[in-house]
Image: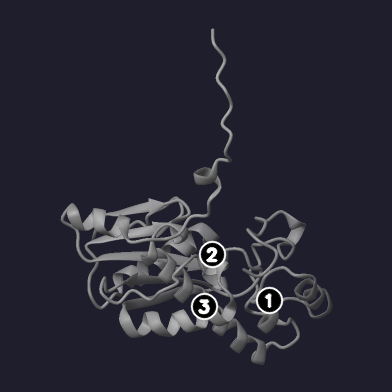
């Protein structure tokens, strides 16, 4: 059997980074669903603070330039896009507290916050695109979970920015109340500074006591990330 000659060019299309666009929204619109909302959350991994979800319905004629996964943007660029999104889109935000996270689990608390954000939109969504593997239960409309959705859909990217900026602002305010942990610097993630603060001062009311290393016996769920997004 004749052997294939290996290609003489790199796999450019396999390695190129994803860039979010409006194709998933237009596909839903073609199927008769409009308007389409994108939804995402921020703060699954931290040791402290809420998980924050956002839902965004973009105006196709006024989509801010540069929308992307919030983790791919600088803090300054996220703030700039946050202002533009709020000025041009329909936006809703909801959160689940550390208490809610401990009473259920981080997945359920995240999905519940996302559901409440979607259901609170001033303009009801006909279809929802969510980041990740799950569509929140209890919605009044159909939806689609999109893996790496914040890098594929501009609506989800917009929601990721709104959720991230909102949560970072909340944790900066929390720093004023609980200055011993450095929340303004790390937003509650398990950095060395944060862990040192817990070791010295013990946990506060914002800490997720079901997360390691806070849970007694150190057998709780590990955090998704140990550094800020």
Q: Position of residue 27 (x, y in %)?
A: 25, 53
**Camera-nearest label, 3 or 1:** 3
Look at mark 2 in the image and give the residue it sits on.
103
- Residue at point 30%, 70% (across, down): 119
Looking at this view, name the residue that lies furthest to the front: 8
**Camera-nearest label, 3 or 2:** 3
- Mark 1 or mark 2, earlier in chain: 2
Quarter location, residue 173: bottom right
Cα separation, mark 3 vs mark 1, equals: 16 Å
Cα separation, mark 3 vs mark 2, equals: 31 Å
What secondary structure is found at the residue carrying circle 3?
A: helix
What secondary structure is found at the residue carrying circle 2?
A: helix
Look at mark 1 in the image and give the residue it sits on.
186
Kindly tell me whether residue 139 is visible in this rendering.
no
Quarter location, residue 210: bottom right
Would residue 228 be found to the left or right of residue 133 on screen? right
Look at mark 3 in the image and give the residue it sits on.
78
The residue nearer to you, when weighing 13 against 71, is: 13
The residue nearer to you, when weighing 228 against 99, is: 228
- Residue at point 57%, 67% (across, down): 71
**Camera-nearest label, 1 or 2:** 1
């Amino acid at each position: 059997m004749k052997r294939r000659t290996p290609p003489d060019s790199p796999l450019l299309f396999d390695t190129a980074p994803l860039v979010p666009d409006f194709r998933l929204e237009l596909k839903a619109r073609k199927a008769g669903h409009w308007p389409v909302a994108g939804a995402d959350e921020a703060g699954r991994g931290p040791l402290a603070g809420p998980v924050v979800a956002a839902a965004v319905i973009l105006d196709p004629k006024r989509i801010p330039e540069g929308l992307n996964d919030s983790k791919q943007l600088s803090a300054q660029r996220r703030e700039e896009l946050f202002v533009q999104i709020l000025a041009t889109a329909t936006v809703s935000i909801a959160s689940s507290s550390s208490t809610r996270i401990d009473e259920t689990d981080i997945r359920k608390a995240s999905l519940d916050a996302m559901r409440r954000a979607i259901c609170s939109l001033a303009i009801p969504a006909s279809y929802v695109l969510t980041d990740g593997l799950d569509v929140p239960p209890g919605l009044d409309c159909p939806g689609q979970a999109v893996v790496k959705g914040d890098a594929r859909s501009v609506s989800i990217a917009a929601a990721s920015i709104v959720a991230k900026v909102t949560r970072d602002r909340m944790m900066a305010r929390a720093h004023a109340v609980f200055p011993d942990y450095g929340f303004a610097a790390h937003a509650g993630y398990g950095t060395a500074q944060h862990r040192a603060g817990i070791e010295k001062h013990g946990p506060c009311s914002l800490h997720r006591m079901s997360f390691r290393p806070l849970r007694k016996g150190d057998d709780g769920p590990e955090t998704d990330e140990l550094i800020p997004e």
